[in-house]
Amino acid sequence: MTLPALFSMRPGADLSTGEGRKVAFFVDTDRIAQLRPHGLGHLSLAWMLPLDGGELRRTFADVQAKAREVSRFGIGALIHAEGLNGLVHGTGIQFPTAWAQAATWMPGLIERSTAITRDQFRDYGIQLCFSPVLDLARDPRWGRVHETFGEDQELAAQLAVAFIRGIQGTGRDTGVLATGKHFLGYSSSDGALNQARTSLGRRQLADEYAEPFRRAITEASLAIVMNSYNEIDGTPAAANRWLLTDLLREQLGFTGLVVSDYDAVTMLHSVYHVAGDQREAAAAALSAGLDVELPADESFRKLREAVEAGLVGEDAVDTAVRRVLEIKQDLGLVPGFAPRRPLRRPEPPDRTAAAAIGRDIAEHAVTLLENDGTLPLRPGAKVVLAGRLADELRIHFGAYTDVANAEVPIAVQLIQAGQVPGVDPDEHFFTELFTTRIPGIGPRFETLTREQYPDTPTLLAALDAAPGLDVTFLDAGSPDTTDPIDTDAVLDAARGADIVVAVLGERTGWAGEHTAGEGQASAQVRLPGNQHELVSVLAQAEAPLVSVLITGRPLVVPDVAEASAAVLLAPLLGAQGPSTVADALTGAIEPGGRLPMTFPRHVGQIPLFHGHPYGSGYAHPTGRRVGYNDLENGPLYPFGHGLGYARLELELLDVHLSDDGGTITARTRTTNHGGRDGSTVVQVYARDEHGSVVRPVRQLLAFERVTVTAGSVADTALEAPVDRLFYTADDGTRGIEAGDVTILVGTSSEQIAGTRTLAVPARRASTR
């Protein structure tokens, strides 16, 4: 293979014509020969996707035909798309967002959803799913929290394995491969700013933040890893050999393909200034272990010059090309080389099953945070439904959804037309698109959402349709204005109501009026607009207040908790959101969610997470050692928290260690004392009582959802391998020292039903 042909295996291309039609762009496949005369490695279409599914399928088939035609060896291109909660396309089958998936604590359910996503990817001819997001989110100020599985490495790891198995199958034989991102520590940047420095030590990165990746690699054969944007100890991730080679490949055992996040390689020169030009940036990234630059080869096109200048060896190019070709071979894109694992026959996506799975996720994700008995709503109740968001559909969707995706071309067209104040429509505006504010765009985006989901009601419509309720809408309180609330008018409207329900939240997406999403860091993490004032006014009403929070991250809402008789969290449930929330309020369903993140009382506590080390954080098993003099140490709502309507009681029966010292088993009993079926999530935590390095005060080991019918009992045995307690010693080995380990079993990280202490022998991880 010639050097130009070698280089052709890696780069991608943007084939957009830039010609708009509604909210999509056409694709010019004839440009392949012009842009990539030796072959096409990857294809990045991003938002430039035809609206019609059939047209999309034909476009990708044409792309592959053209790619094979220009390739000397007839090699096809890798086509990728986002699939965080379904294919990001107008015809994509959508599920509740990742944070909602995490709130279910049900890996098997998530695997079923991503199997649907896989079928749709393959049906359209897309081979790479650029999901899941495996970042641990411990700082809610960061705008991308809703894309993650939360704060805990064990919860994230189990959900990641399930997600990837749904996409790839257990044998990587589905014709679609998953991508774990972002490697590493991207979510814990200084100040929660997007793409900023991460001030974490190597041990914490390897033991906590890399754990979901480790498990995805060892338990789900993760095929692709995407680097993160951040820099660690002075070296950006895209050029960090310790991250991409020493940790990822040598310690975690990854053998697949490493791709860049969009523009991460060019940023080595343009943002971080660690490369003098794009040639140096390309050499640094390739030398670190990054195989493919995306979305196109802005820097990697200089690799030939870098090789000739001696900045990087040709052997590094060979290694990267081999990794690309192995992935292409596994996907049937290399003529004459059969996939190393025979590919199963594709099946069309089952939309009927998808709807049922989406609803199942939503019911097990909607989370009851507070309840003094006010919920569920009684039949015949007079309900005042307050808050403009009660009659909005867009609020229930996150970024990386079909809805948010369709908004981007609209924003682009407005900017290009010079209709966005303060934004210069030059060639560089797109890099700032995620943080561009477009005042007054909300109604247009809401109309777009309703056009995409014409049969989906708002919460107002869903609750109004509930039998036996008398619902009155109060259009007061909005995320879009800080105008003072008309106190007299609000209290007058609430007079005579049995219950007042306030619908509160924040919008999540890209350009527009969103306050959460990629590039949307928040310093205060409060409800935007005048919603806090609305709660303060409604608290003065005679009727009890129920607050519904629609958000994809923890918000600082102690005032909401104090004012409310009940609080219900709807963690971006998508099209399933309004009806699910209405059913949870009326008691038609049992709210099944459990928090995947800790809710702080104050922004000054952040980062706040349950598994903090001894001597730090809010929990100190040996007594209160440190704390604030003006604030209670603990969280507003702890990790794993969630209530239900059923009267369930958890009991720890016993805990034992297997004879070989490798498995911990906890046996529990859950009793339903009421007349209503219900479920809970039994959570098993561990506390290593002594180690040569500082250990966490608690660590999630295992969990299982248990459903108990009215008046019955359910016994459960939860097992966890001891290696989930492994950590990195000073000599670089992983294992656990001999000593006592306390097992804590409960229904949240704070609600512990019982504890037992085990003497655990020393164990070490096998070396590679």
Image (cartoon, rainbow, N blue to C red):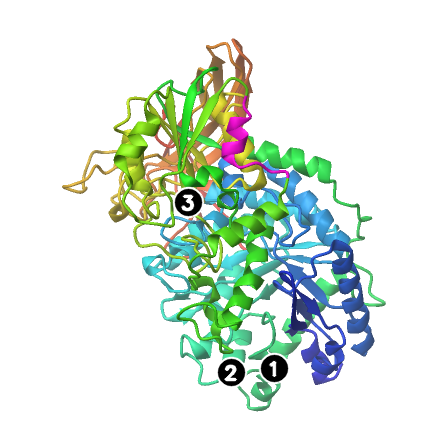
Q: Depth check: 761 or 66 in front?
A: 66
Dot 3: element: loop
- Depth check, mark 3 against mark 2: the one in front is 3
Give the quarter of the image for residue 94. top right
Relative horizontal placement of residue 372, taking residue 284 as reference (left or right): left
Quarter of the rendering occupied by the C terminus: bottom right
Q: Which residue is at 21% across, 36% downward? A: 632
Q: How crowded is mark 1: few (under 14 residues within 10 Å), some or many (20 or more)?
A: some
Range shown magenta:
455-466
Mark 1 secondary-structure assignment: helix
**Is 330 left or right of 284, judged from the image as shown?**
right
Quadrant of residue 44 in the image? bottom right
The residue sitting at the bottom extreme is 309
Q: Which residue is drawn at 47% across and 57% down?
A: 441
Counting residues from the N terminus, which is met first, the one under dot 3 or under dot 2? 2
Residue placed under numbered mark 1 in the picture: 301
Q: Residues within 10 Å of mark 2 (few under 14, many from 20)?
A: many
Image: 40 above or below 565: below
**x then y, percent, for residue 540:** 25, 28
User: Toward the viewer: 138 or 321?
Assistant: 138
Q: What residue does disc 2 label?
A: 278
Label whose residue precedes the other's in the sequence (2 or 1):
2
